[in-house]
Image: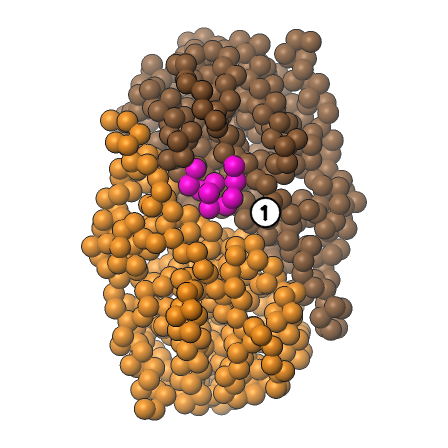
Chain colours: A brown, B orange
Amino acid sequence: MALEDRVRELAGEVQPPDRDAAAKARERQLVLTKPPGSLGLLEELGMQLAGMAGEAPPPVPVNPAVVICAGDHGVLARGVSPWPQEVTAIMVRNFCAGGAAANVLAGTVGARVSVLDVGVAVDLEQRPLLRTAKKRYGTEDLSRRPAMSREDAAGAVISGAGVAEELIESGVDLLVTGDMGIGNTTPAAALISAFTGRPPKETTGRGTGIDDETFKLKVRVVEEALQLHEPDPADPLGVLAALGGLEHAAIVGLVLMGAVYGVPVVLDGVVSNSAALVAHTLASDCMGYLIAGHLSTEPGAAEALRYLGLEPVMNLSMRLGEGTGGLLAVPVVQAAASVLKEMATMEEAGIG
Amino acid sequence: MALEDRVRELAGEVQPPDRDAAAKARERQLVLTKPPGSLGLLEELGMQLAGMAGEAPPPVPVNPAVVICAGDHGVLARGVSPWPQEVTAIMVRNFCAGGAAANVLAGTVGARVSVLDVGVAVDLEQRPLLRTAKKRYGTEDLSRRPAMSREDAAGAVISGAGVAEELIESGVDLLVTGDMGIGNTTPAAALISAFTGRPPKETTGRGTGIDDETFKLKVRVVEEALQLHEPDPADPLGVLAALGGLEHAAIVGLVLMGAVYGVPVVLDGVVSNSAALVAHTLASDCMGYLIAGHLSTEPGAAEALRYLGLEPVMNLSMRLGEGTGGLLAVPVVQAAASVLKEMATMEEAGIG
């Protein structure tokens, strides 16, 4: 089957969450030993988790994993980032050696780390944590031509989905999306503008940290890309191929496969948020399985989450990527499920 | 020594955090494998933890504990809460049996639970998690007379401090403040108005959930209390005795003793925030050891944190108390320390 058809098939397998289980969880929230609603977003998350799992109380996720999808970006040639392309590969090695922020935060929350090379510009030596499914050595400059072919975009989606499936089959019960790719906030901004309709000056941010002049250039680059490709939101794979990155595509696959399995998918920041827009357009039912781990300081993140109707769990003014913001939300998700499973009811405690 | 003098002595023992260690941590943030500042509040927390510990990188807190301070409130007679006083004792039993939200969230983040009865209106049977240091069977109605004597307020501070010291001596390296007391958001609002100068209508909230009429009454009760006592912020123990609760006083003691030992104290919501105002006035250096675990939906919480200059870690629209919001921040604090301790530097990774 052609890769595009496989993506469509995967999207078609996503089922809406179980409303009855969510409703049952809602009722249970009302009889636990707390004023109704007093746990705020934690109560909402608990009901959402019940819907995903199809049971109330939902199981507590105990085997989280972050998948850091990595790729390079032809648009870097336009000067949109102060960091050289080599840093993508260096950081992949850093993940494999356990020295990056994502490794540290994964350790804090007990998550395993996988790295998926779908498009790093150089060949990387094999490492235990690294999976290689390289489609190309980085994308093309999206401001001049399509970032990649539809086939490559679809292939990266399928690779991301494959890693998710393998992890879930091996016992992972919560996925955190992560990204690494110098220059990848530029395609993220372009995707967010394409799907939300917000102008590039509102979706583009300073990424790893750029000066005013570079920021203006970056906005212009995104504007040029949108003018060149005239993206059609009704063709999500076409938009992804024209404007996206290979790691963005792989994250679309993580989201779709997580949703197919009914496993919660915790989104990291702006790159994951932009990928979620693609996934949402491919299969709107996947929304029920998505949790916005945090609100990145990149302005496109807020635009994407608003469009998707997702409330972020964390808001720590972070903008690192790698899955770091998503990882910090993991204990909150676990707590939300545990509340439903373990708290005493009013009746049990002798209230009322 | 009189109890008041013991409080003053304790406050006098608080030393400012170590600026050199904080500065050293700040330098280290700049050379780790991430764009400077990209971990946002996590980087700030890391520097603060270094200052508390007097070393950079700071130790990672691995033995957190929540102390749930419990007391009853004479002001309940004014009808400020829909819940009967008996629920305080029922919830203390629920904590001891492990069935409350605080127990569940403590389990999620690996914290031990202690309950301190400084003023529950009934005698409670002994339980392994319960410490009894009851000063009175609840407070007086603060809208009609002082809530308690200065001696009782000071005694509850010393009891809270004693529990903190005992826990720290037994290996606890992070304290989360918790509270239980039906009616205790009314004294919290009164304390916050007294110290910040904000009017009661801006510091009073709906607590466990009250209707418009009860809310108006609650604001009026706080206004009456302030008019009656004319609290002088320069006399923090006097303000605490006139307007506070015994659990608020015990939390003041937790804060002060945590600061004396250089142990991070993670504040829960509005009751803890109001106690922090008292502690801050007694010993402004204790601020360096305080972390605002979350922003409660109670409006007084935002006023108190703004006054104290504290940025909340979590914001999940929670308003339960018990330490629940503080507990959810524990992994973030641990992550902040771990980043400094475990991340590779740019040089180690071969960048630059």
For the record, the magenta segment spans A103-112
Find the residue positioned furthest to the right. Answer: A20
Q: Nearer the viewer, residue A39 or A258?
A: A258
Q: Position of residue B167 (x, y in %)?
A: 44, 70
Q: What residue did someone put label 1 on?
A: A333
Tell me if residue A107 is in the magenta stretch: yes
Name the side, left or right, on which A291 lies relative to A53.
Answer: left
The quadrant holding residue B210 is bottom right
Quadrant of the snapshot with the C terminus of chain B: top left
Q: Nearer the viewer, residue A308 or A227?
A: A308
Q: Nearer the viewer, residue B34 or A214?
A: B34
Q: Residue at coordinates 35% horizontally, 79% vertically from top-left?
A: B236
Find the residue positioned furthest to the left. Answer: B20
Name the side, left or right, on which B339 lies relative to A63.
Answer: left
Q: Position of residue B131 (x, y in %)?
A: 53, 78
Q: Residue at coordinates 63% horizontally, 32% vertically from top-left?
A: A170
The quadrant holding residue B35 is top left
Q: Position of residue A345 (x, y in %)?
A: 72, 64
Q: Nearer the viewer, residue B340 or A267?
A: B340
For the question of whether residue B254 can be seen, the reply is no
* Mark 1 neighbour density, 10 Å: few (under 14) some (14–19) many (20 or more): many
Q: Residue at coordinates 43% horizontally, 64% vertically from top-left?
A: B172
Task: Provide the chain ID for the residue under circle 1.
Answer: A
Quadrant of the snapshot with the N terminus of chain B: bottom left
For the question of whether residue B285 can be seen, the reply is yes
Above or below, A8 against B310 in this view is: above
Tell me if residue A196 is in the magenta stretch: no
